[in-house]
Amino acid sequence: MGDYVNVKELFGCDVFNDSVMQERLPKKVYKELKKTIEEGKELSMEVADVVAHEMKEWAIEKGATHYSHWFQPLTGVTAEKHDAFITAPMENGKVLQSFSGKELIKGEPDASSFPSGGLRATFEARGYTTWDCTSPAFVRHDAAGGTLCIPTAFCSYTGEALDQKTPLLRSMEAINTQALRLLRLFGNTTSRRVTPSVGAEQEYFLVDKEKYMQRKDLVYTGRTLFGAMPPKGQEMDDHYFGTIRQRVSAYMKEVNEECWKLGVTAKTQHNEVAPAQHELAPIYAPVNIAADHNQIMMRILKKVASRHGMRCLLHEKPFAGLNGSGKHNNWSLTTDDGINLLEPGKTPHENIQFLLVLTCILKAVDKHADLLRESAADVGNDQRLGGHEAPPAVISVFLGEQLEDVLEQLISTGTATRSKTGEKLATGVKTLPDFMKDATDRNRTSPFAFTGNKFEFRMVGSKDSISACNVVLNTITAEAFKEACDILEKAEDFDLAVHDLIKKYATEHQRIVFNGNGYAPEWEKEARRRGLPILPSMVDAIPALTTDKAVELFGEFGVFTKTELESRAEIQYEIYAKAINIEAKTMIDMATKQIIPAVIKYTTVLAESINQVKAVGPIDVSVQMDLLKKASKLLKEVNSAMNKLSKLVDQVEAHPEGRERAVFCREKLVPAMEKLRQPVDELEMLVDKEMWPMPSYGDLVFEP
Ligand code: ADP
Ligand code: MG
């Protein structure tokens, strides 16, 4: 039974969680800490010292030698700096291991090389990490040994957020305050906290490591920049939910175990639509924990892949022509006493509180569609959104038959008197149970879909942090709740007022509801007619961050200052330009050093063989000639496209950093890259496979 896994024992065994704290901390200290975690009370240094000491003792027992303030700067990945627990040797030459409250609470990484969008001049490189005690510390084991990782927020010397976590925590405060106000209006006096709950489904690809290493595009950019479609793609749909190959099963088993050890509730795994594509979803958790756990999960997915001779691709679009990867963000609002504000119940038309919550969210999404779109903007996602496999770059809301019908009743007659119910689904087989169908079918094409008791935001890229979209969801909903509460708290006749408000919101924001096929080309036309923002590229989306509307929204709820928003926009532009520039340079490198030489070799061999055949006698060499002509023509195209791209790359630096450079990359580099790719992909179909200098799509996705 060497392989027997006791999940109960394994789960959370490397986490300094509530039960560990309860067991190890003196009662008084435990209580104080809980108050900080649950009510945001300030933590005294005495308490911090005790917690730090116990945390260290526990971590050392788990094999930790170092501690690290673990944070999420705006690079999109996590960052950490490791310090050993050891202190200066004592007189007898031995060392002690210590860890103080101060070291737990505050860290000061040299922050000058993290993006700050101008917030922190390099000479003023101070940045602080502060312990986020709402997300538990954990011991991570890897090649570096055991490290006590302490989740932290990262701010500048002047208190501006330099990370993903700080605004997320701020937005949680905002939604908590406003949602409690709303609940009180409906007579709820017992709930003490409202927290956004999030379950993030993570998609990824697995490819063989040896083959991966032979593709510079994958190594440098995370996606293939060249590559012709194999004879078989995903058209048979035979991979989706298909039997999981043994090599991948072994991988998933280890991923699950590593996740469980760190308290990450890895729950559902299956093959996805594209060959070599898979998905892993945890059980939903409070959003700040969900965001941390998603980062941990991505790291585990990568680390375990290496151990199995594979590479995990988290890029949004590793292969043109195959489905890309996303991260579905399932979002709901839950009270500390277990009420889900997005639960419609069996008869939503009678559930006034739900209808108010729902119409507030419609209003919020309609008003701030541009911000929600921006929150999912990342360089890789530009390749995926709107590709007829992922939501289009237009925000709309899918409500489903039942709720749409309730809203229509509200809008047309002023009251909703009935809810469509699910029918019985007869299986037609005696031994199979009949069951009640959901009142609403799924719509997989909508970017923001109501799925029973939660909204699923499907635009987020697979590589991206889920923080940004949840900051937006929390804050825009807080604003809508606030505006509703401002009116309703003053109303003389509450029932009448709330009824009118629901009707008003439903009517005014009906345009954001779309239940049709979001992949259909007609939808874009219709969206344009409705006046919904269409923002195809990241570069088009970034300006949403700094509109007056956004500054007002985030300022009102203390989530972002204007300066913070401007810095974030700046960073986004920089990230975009840098990433595209790297892609362009990688293409040039591959074309120059690998592709063009391979084609030259191929044409030379062809030409030589033509001569040799001709020498034998009057034999027809028209096929060889034809191939030679085609290949030579394409080679010329490659060369000229590459020269054009090179010239453009040389001009990048001449454009000032920020928006101007990003726009240049988007408008000039991206099309020039496509121009280079075309003839190369055609050549791949022509040239002798033995001579093609890198593994093909077929090699990568069908035999990992
Ligand atoms: P589906 O198949 O409908 O996409 P699943 O039940 O597989 O839904 O759940 C997808 C993700 O949504 C999981 O991470 C799950 O934990 C999460 N989830 C389920 N209910 C909620 C909820 N009320 N709030 C937030 N997330 C939820
Ligand atoms: Mg889903």
Image (spheres, rainbow, N blue to C red):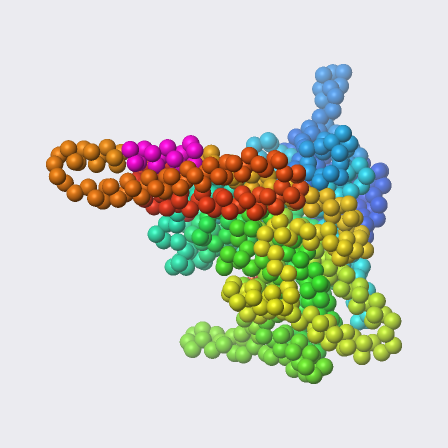
- Decide whether residue 178 is among the magenta residues: no
Q: Which residues are magenta?
A: 591-604
Relative to 196, residue 61 above or below: above
**On the picture, is 303 further left or further right than 617?**
right
* Residue drawn at 75 percent across, 19 percent down: 90
* Residue drawn at 51 percent across, 49 percent down: 317
Q: Looking at the image, can residue 256 be seen?
A: no
Q: Front-most of 546 and 518?
A: 546
Q: How many marks?
A: 0
**On the picture, is 192 further left or further right than 534?**
right
Q: Quadrant of residue 621?
A: top left
The image quadrant where one finds ligand 1 is: bottom right
Place of residue 280 in the rendered image (x, y in percent of width and height, measured from the top left): 54, 52
Q: Quadrant of residue 99?
A: top right
Q: Looking at the image, can residue 47 be seen?
A: yes
Place of residue 36 in the rendered image (x, y in percent of width and height, measured from the top left): 81, 48
Relative to 252, residue 240 above or below: below
Q: Front-most of 573 and 614?
A: 614
Q: Main secondary structure of the magenta part?
A: helix
**On the picture, is 482 further left or further right than 685?**
right
Q: Front-most of 491 and 603?
A: 603
Place of residue 585 in the rendered image (x, y in percent of width and height, measured from the top left): 51, 36
Relative to 475, residue 118 above or below: above
Place of residue 666 in the rendered image (x, y in percent of width and height, measured from the top left): 57, 46
Relative to 210, residue 391 above or below: below
* Residue drawn at 72 percent across, 22 percent down: 95
Quadrant containing the C terminus in the rendered view? top left
- Residue projecting furthest to the left: 617
Q: Front-most of 604 and 36?
A: 604
- Decide whether residue 601 is among the magenta residues: yes
